[in-house]
Amino acid sequence: MAKTILIVDDTQSMRMLLREYLAAQGFRTLSAANGREALVVAQQEAPDLVLLDVMMPELDGYEFIRHYRRHHDTPIILLTARLDESDKVIGLELGADDYVTKPFGMAELTARIRAVLRRTGQPVSNSLLRAGPILLDRATRLVQVAGRSVDLTPSEFELLALFLNFPGRVFSRNELLERLQGDPAERVERTIDVHIRNLRSKIETDPAHPQHIQTVFGVGYRLRPDEAAGTP
């Protein structure tokens, strides 16, 4: 069954261009002209991924994410014309999974979409992973920390699953970005720092002094080596 992409952009020509191109790539497409309209469409249609412009009237992209992430973990890719990296970081901190800067190439955008969809729909092997108080179930996408359910975005879920699969292994920021994005033309290492910070805020007792996801200065990140992972 074709995956459904919700395109949210206040420019009609952009919506039409994206709908035509993505439909030709085999996707089912929906569209909305602003964040408020997008919330209604998303509730009715349950898209597999949202392409989201940042600057829109009525309800901008950031406000859409704030509302949408209360009840949905559907992956979100930001479409942003802003050049300031801090604007992109805001979107990631709110729960976006990736971003593409306008103007962008259609091939790169499609690659980003497929990379995100692969993460959320990949075959399940070793469904249950455990490390200390953390339990992750790939089949149901359930995450618990000390028995407490935790809601993660697709990118946060993928990072945690990777760490649980390889306890103690140090991953560079570039390696983690490659796992999340494939090989995009635009790669900003700070993206991973934001995802890690968001992940720590959800699984660590004291995110300022993390006990599970450790920073290896000058290299990257790892799961604390003495936390065994595997099927319980």
Image (cartoon, rainbow, N blue to C red):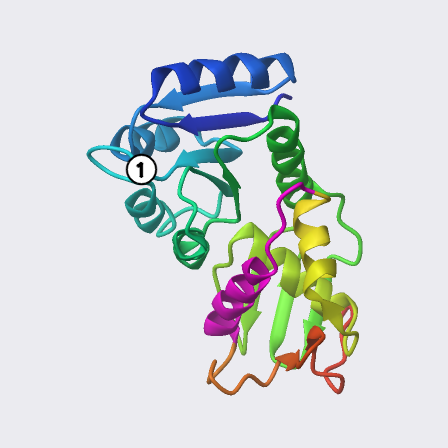
Q: Quadrant of the C terminus?
A: bottom right
- The residue sitting at 44% across, 26% down in the picture is 7
Q: Quadrant of the N terminus?
A: top right
Q: Which residues are magenta?
A: 184-203
- The residue sitting at 31% across, 37% down in the picture is 55
Q: Position of residue 225 (x, y in %)?
A: 76, 84
| Residue highlighted by disc 1 | 55
Q: SS of the residue at dot 1?
A: loop
Left or right of 225 in this view: 120? left
Q: Is residue 7 above or below residue 218?
A: above
What secondary structure characterizes most of the magenta part? helix
- The residue sitting at 34% across, 41% down in the picture is 61
What residue type is disc 1 on? Answer: Met
Q: Position of residue 229 (x, y in %)?
A: 76, 74
Identity of the residue furthest to the front in this view = 83
Residue nearest the viewer, comparing 141 with 180: 180
- The residue sitting at 39% across, 52% down in the picture is 87
Residue nearest the viewer, comparing 12 with 96: 12
How many numbered marks are there? Answer: 1
Residue 21 lies within the magenta run = no
The quarter of the displayed image where residue 106 is located = top right
Q: Is residue 56 above or below residue 106?
A: below
Pointer 1: residues within 10 angstroms few (<14), some, or many (20+)? some
Q: Position of residue 128 (x, y in %)?
A: 71, 62
Left or right of 190 in this view: 70? left
Q: Is residue 149 visible?
A: no
The quarter of the displayed image where residue 104 is located = top right
Q: Position of residue 4 (x, y in %)?
A: 53, 25
